[in-house]
């Protein structure tokens, strides 16, 4: 049996679109937590986005170190993706975003 990928690892491994064989969504990660990093992440996938787009951002936990500042997101959406909506989900683990209520 082949080794199963471990979520959250191997984020630097890019598979070009023409080499992908599954129907699974592509997920992109960046370790550059800056306004420039957000724009760079967008530019990586921007050419492939058309129509109404859901932008899923992991914004971190309340008071956590990885919260993306709202001005970065607002600028990205308003300038690059005016028809997009921000999408967020609950977390699988117990915490501040474990439930919607």
Image: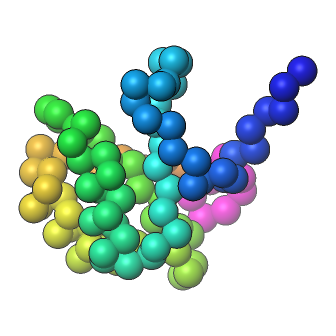
Q: Is residue 34 magenta?
A: no
- Magenta stretch, main secondary structure, is loop
Q: How is the image coloured?
A: rainbow
Where residue 96 appears, x then y in whole percent?
A: 60, 64
Where residue 86 appears, x then y in whole percent?
A: 30, 51
- Can residue 33 be seen here? yes
Q: Which residue occupies the foreground of this view, 26 or 65?
A: 26
In the image, taking residue 67 as reference, residue 7 lies left or right, namely: right
Q: Residue at x 29, y 56 (%)?
A: 42
Which quadrant is home to the N terminus?
top right
Q: Residue at x 20, y 63 (%)?
A: 76
Q: Is residue 92 magenta?
A: yes
* Image position of 45 with respect to 42: above or below: above
Q: Which residue occupies the foreground of this view, 33 or 90?
A: 33
* Image position of 85 with respect to 42: above or below: above
- Part of the protein shown in magenta: 91-101
Where residue 59 appears, x then y in whole percent?
A: 46, 65
* Image position of 11 with respect to 16: above or below: below
Q: Residue at x 32, y 52 (%)?
A: 44
- Can residue 99 be seen here? no
In the image, taking residue 79 as reference, residue 10 lies left or right, namely: right
């Amino acid at each position: 049996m082949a080794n199963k990928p471990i979520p959250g690892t191997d984020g630097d491994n890019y598979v070009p679109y023409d080499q992908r064989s599954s129907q699974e969504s592509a997920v992109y990660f960046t370790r550059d937590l800056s306004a420039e990093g957000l724009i760079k992440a967008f530019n990586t996938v921007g050419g492939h986005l058309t129509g109404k787009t859901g932008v899923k951002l992991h914004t971190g936990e309340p008071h956590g170190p990885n919260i993306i500042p709202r001005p970065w997101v607002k600028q990205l959406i308003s300038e690059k993706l005016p028809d997009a909506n921000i999408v967020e989900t609950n977390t699988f683990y117990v915490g501040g975003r474990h439930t919607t209520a």
